[in-house]
Image: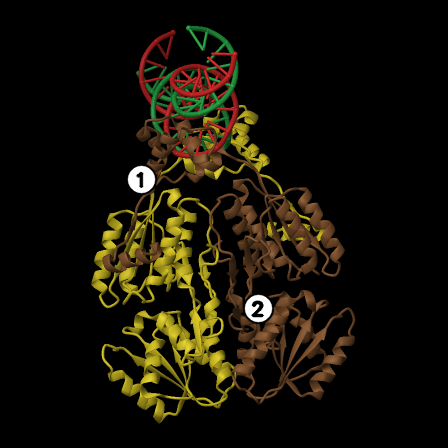
Chain colours: A brown, B yellow, C green, D red
Amino acid sequence: MHPVYSLILSYIFKYQYIIEPNNQITIKDIAEKANVSIGTVDRVLHHRGEVAESTKKRILAIVDELGYKPNIFASNLASKKPVTFATLFPKPVSEEGYWTKPMIGVQKRVAELKHYGVQLQSFTFSQVNPKEFISVAEKIVSIKPEGVVLAPFFKKESLGFIELLKENHIPFVFIDSEIKDAGQISYIGQYSYQSGMVSGKLLDMMLAEGNILVVHFAKEMDNQNHLVEREKGFYDWYKLNNTSSHQLQTIEIADTSNDKWMKKVKDFITEYRIKGIFVTNSKVFYIGRLIEKFSLEGLKVIGHDLLTENIGFLKKDIVQFLICQRPEEQGYNAVNKLFRHVVQKREIEKEKYTSIDILTKENVDYYNEFSKS
Amino acid sequence: MHPVYSLILSYIFKYQYIIEPNNQITIKDIAEKANVSIGTVDRVLHHRGEVAESTKKRILAIVDELGYKPNIFASNLASKKPVTFATLFPKPVSEEGYWTKPMIGVQKRVAELKHYGVQLQSFTFSQVNPKEFISVAEKIVSIKPEGVVLAPFFKKESLGFIELLKENHIPFVFIDSEIKDAGQISYIGQYSYQSGMVSGKLLDMMLAEGNILVVHFAKEMDNQNHLVEREKGFYDWYKLNNTSSHQLQTIEIADTSNDKWMKKVKDFITEYRIKGIFVTNSKVFYIGRLIEKFSLEGLKVIGHDLLTENIGFLKKDIVQFLICQRPEEQGYNAVNKLFRHVVQKREIEKEKYTSIDILTKENVDYYNEFSKS
DNA sequence: ATAAATTCCGTGTTCGTACACGGAAAAAAT
DNA sequence: ATTTTTTCCGTGTACGAACACGGAATTTAT
């Protein structure tokens, strides 16, 4: 029976459940019972030095019988070997940019693990410059970290980096987006397709009829697989729920360095009598700005991620929903996976989908990502 | 400047942020620099024994200057005093009942803290029997725990219990519902009024017109203050958003031991042409059963909490939204607050409102409460 | 049989903190 | 001036694991 489940059962049936005190079994206990010295037990447990096969067996049997669990405090106190992790994320476009968020989570977990000797070196690359990615990647390999958290933004370049990591036996986890079966120890991120479905449902709920526009704000759509996935999920929701009263269209905007795109989108909205807009990433504030600038009315808007500006539009009811994927938590979890794998040598899940959180004007103020602090 | 913020800044500006290794300053370092013995420093840091005012000042200045942080591993290794926490929750009505959930979170955190010598004794009381509450409360005081997590279900009886706790200097935290300024070190729970607002918005979004029914499934409404708050928030949303096309009504159902209530509610729905139903607690599955039994159609339903049966109705599209308050996380956090207060002697927040999570058919499968495991 | 190499294992120290015990110095009482 | 009390502080051990060092026992080579 699963342990947690049995806890619940005993709770239900006894109505008073007691978690017993921590009866520490020590190496000394084992040594005494096996009639050997502490050093011998130590050698068996850490596979160092040589121990006669017979005594080795005897000791392991006793370890098992007594259920020996090393005392983490004593263990860490005595060892103290430093562990370095590296991160490689896109450079955030501003202090409020999306990519600051995973970094916050990373730093939080690293700070917590400082006592374990965990150190961090974080690197970034420009989102428009694959060459920088390569040079930074090489720098990371040269410092030989014990683990890497990586956003595989440029697929081809990432694959090269991964080869280097594998050669050097450096474990790595993907964050945000994934390359399947590339040797990562884990992936932390969103289930983009499903989050698109959620957006579809919400927009459909608000709009009995009217045409709908899907907007990608992205420079290189080839490298933005999860935006495509979101779009697919969004379209599929409408397909699966026979809502023929809508027409769906997609538009891509690569350049937002000047205001040219605004006119284009505005004309589009007018021409096709668009009533609902779904922005596939955190850049929904651009639509917010557009709506304010031209005083457009009656539009329902859904976008992603809790950027400060997005929250502003949410509160002004210019954006009705933000879908959020807990980016801080992703960073936190990614480091945690590395830690569990590298330091604690525990089993870890290969994939970890974060929640698809629905934020509105009403609940956004009570949304806490880091509730366990 | 706030430390996290400065981390972000340095990250932004340098594009490569390094968290340095853990340079442990030891008590010995302080002792040497202050030209006293380790024992003296120890006395200063733990306020035990007596130390001349002058040396005390000198030591504290050095502690400050060197930024001494005790090594948690050594500290825990050396101390090892057992700490007992007690919980007092309503008895869950079944294995699937709501109150098993906070208990799961409690047990999870206690298990994690076992290394710190944390033990748990959990107690329950019947939701219909205030006398039992009193007798169990006395039992708890008699075992003199170092801290208590309490659901103040019966207000009057809870106040008596709290008096006892205060006399014995036992700190306590409230969970689920709160008695204001009763001496708790913290409260963990929902902001019920605001969650009612969220429900209002969602239901209104789904229903352009049609009458609405608010249903309380509860025995003693006096003790269920948060149900009233949710109702209030719900009504207020409609009031604040001038939606005159609806009529709102409330119904209370105290007895669900037999099926009598069903006919009553069904007739009500027919008579008043109800199109939307909001159930103020986790008992929304009763409405689900009703709808299935009489094959009612075109109803939009919102309820609370992720009970298995509720999830079933959500997936069958009989219930459109479940508002969730992360009960496991509440239990987890409550224990954590006690731990931080009692063991780590750190400052803790007095109130902690949990997120108001919106769950639909589409995102419920990706909702992970305990994502940090 | 003795020397050399190999296998096996015990002792002792270290990590940094907690805490008990009791001694020395200073102050107060006789 | 001597005893008693109070103030102040140093020494030593324990917590449990990690790890280095080197000694004893056994095997192999000469």
Image quadrant where residue A177 sits: bottom right
Residue B57 % position (x, y)? 53, 32
> Is the C-beta separation of discs 1 and 2 under 8 Å?
no
Which residue occupies 35% across, 56% down? A4
Residue B334 % position (x, y)? 40, 56
SS class, disc 1 = helix
The residues bearing labels 1 and 2 have C-alpha atoms spaced at a distance of 47 Å
Residue A353 % position (x, y)? 52, 62
Which numbered marker is on residue A192? 2
Residue to which mark 1 is pinned: A65
Image quadrant where residue A181 sits: bottom right
Q: Which of A122 and A1 is in front in this view?
A: A1
Q: Nearer the viewer, residue B369 or A129?
A: A129
Q: Which of B173 and A128 is in front in this view?
A: A128
Q: What residue type is labelled 2?
A: Ser
Q: Earlier in the sequence, mark 1 or mark 2?
A: 1
**In screen coordinates, is B132 left or right of B198?**
left
Q: What residue type is labelled 1?
A: Glu
Q: How crowded is mark 2: few (under 14 residues within 10 Å), some or many (20 or more)?
A: many
In this picture, is B38 found above or below A118? above
**In screen coordinates, is B219 left or right of C25?**
left
Q: Which of B162 and B342 is in front in this view?
A: B342
Q: Residues within 10 Å of mark 1 (few under 14, many from 20)?
A: few
Which residue occupies 66% across, 48% down? A164
Have a look at marks 1 and 2 and say if they share a chain. Answer: yes
Q: Mark 2 lies on which chain?
A: A
SS class, disc 2 = helix
